[in-house]
Image: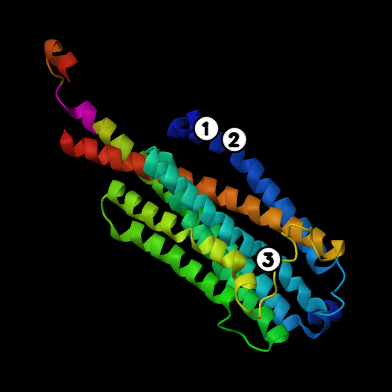
Amino acid sequence: MWKYANPRLFLDLAEKLLPWFAGLTVLLFAVGLYISLIGSPPDYQQGDSVRIMYVHVPAAWMALFCYVFMASASVVGLVWRHALADLAAKSTAPIGACFTFLALFSGSFWGKPMWGDWWVWDARVTSVLILFFLYLGYIALWETIEDHARAARAAAVLAIVGVIMVPIIKFSVDWWETLHQPASVLRFDGPTIHASLLWPLFTMALAFTFFFFTVLLIRMRTEIIQQRIRALRLAAIEE
Amino acid sequence: MSAFLSMGGYGAYVWPAYFAAALVLGLLTVWSLRKLKAEARQLERLESQLARHGERRPRPPATSQSAN
């Protein structure tokens, strides 16, 4: 596995994987959207508004998954100085920010009919908003620090410190009185929602996951090319 | 069809959530692909520039070549 930390080998692997990931993403979204919107029954209490869940929950899961992925890659980049790990972390941030935004946006459109308001300063909603700002801060650090190695270090430290938000978000619904409901799928005692709602949820979650890896590969390729451009320019100056 | 669009009265909430997801993920994909193409083009330009530059440079005498 470590040999793919070599950019050249990684590029070869990425090129082979990309069409498969992209194809799977499209297929999963096609099936997922069908069962989410047509092939599943409305909820007995929430009616058709429950269909917002099939966008909202996968987006929220991926917002957290991307953050953990970014922080883990940052640890590898910081401790073992793997250049590819830094690039993986950097490439993840905008994707994670998009998922976080979508979780908040779809949550707002679900909150209006169910809670009666577009926005509530509930512990879950607020902590996810903080996660969104963490992503933006991380992106801003990369943008503002000129030197690549220094930017990588500073951004990695922010990502690692910010990982504290992940358990806070996960357990916010248990620690505080929230309007947001507690977990009903990822529980120790098994899911508490009906199977007819789980199928569209898992298919969409898988679609979101493959979407993430597809765009990640595209963005990491871009970063490797940019690194090569920087190296060539530096070599040209030194000559 | 209209029953499908109305989503049991929740159409005004369900559809924007799906459209926002399609829009944001779509734009992210397009942006990422365009950036990849632009950077790949730039690398190609830079590499050909450097290759041309190398050709034009007067060849050093054979003895000092290894020192390069």
The residue wearing badge 2 is A16
Give the camera-side residue of B37 and A177.
A177
Asked if residue A166 is among those painted magenta in the image, a careful observer would answer no
Q: Residue at x 58, y 55 (%)?
A: A65
On whether residue B54 falls in the magenta region, the answer is yes
Tell me the amino acid under the disc marked 1.
Asp
**Image coords of residue A37 (percent x, y):** 80, 68
Q: Main secondary structure of the magenta part?
A: helix
Place of residue A79 in the rendered image (x, y in percent of width and height, measured from the top left): 38, 41
Residue A36 visible in the displayed image: yes
The earlier-in-sequence mark between 1 and 3 is 1
Dot 2 amino acid type: Lys
Determine contact: label 2, label 1, CB under 8 Å: yes
Q: Which residue is mark 3?
A: A57
Q: Is residue A229 left or right of residue A85?
A: left
Residue A41: x, y in percent? Answer: 87, 70
Q: Residues within 10 Å of mark 3 (few under 14, many from 20)?
A: many
Magenta extent: B53-58
Quadrant for the N terminus of chain B, please: bottom right
Q: Which mark is residue B44?
A: none
- Distance CA(mark 3)–CA(mark 2): 30 Å
Please provide percent x and percent y for residue A123: 57, 76
Nearest to the observer: residue A119 or residue A180: A180
Classify 10 Å Cα crowding around label 2: few (below 14), some (14-19), many (20 and above): few
| Secondary element at tag 1 | helix
Q: Which image quarter: residue B60?
A: top left
**A204 or A225: nearer the eye?**
A204
Question: To which residue does mark 1 refer?
Answer: A12
Residue kind at label 3, given as amino acid type:
Val
Q: Quick check: A10 left or right of A204?
A: left
Name which residue lies at 35% across and 42% down: A227
Q: Chain of mark 3?
A: A
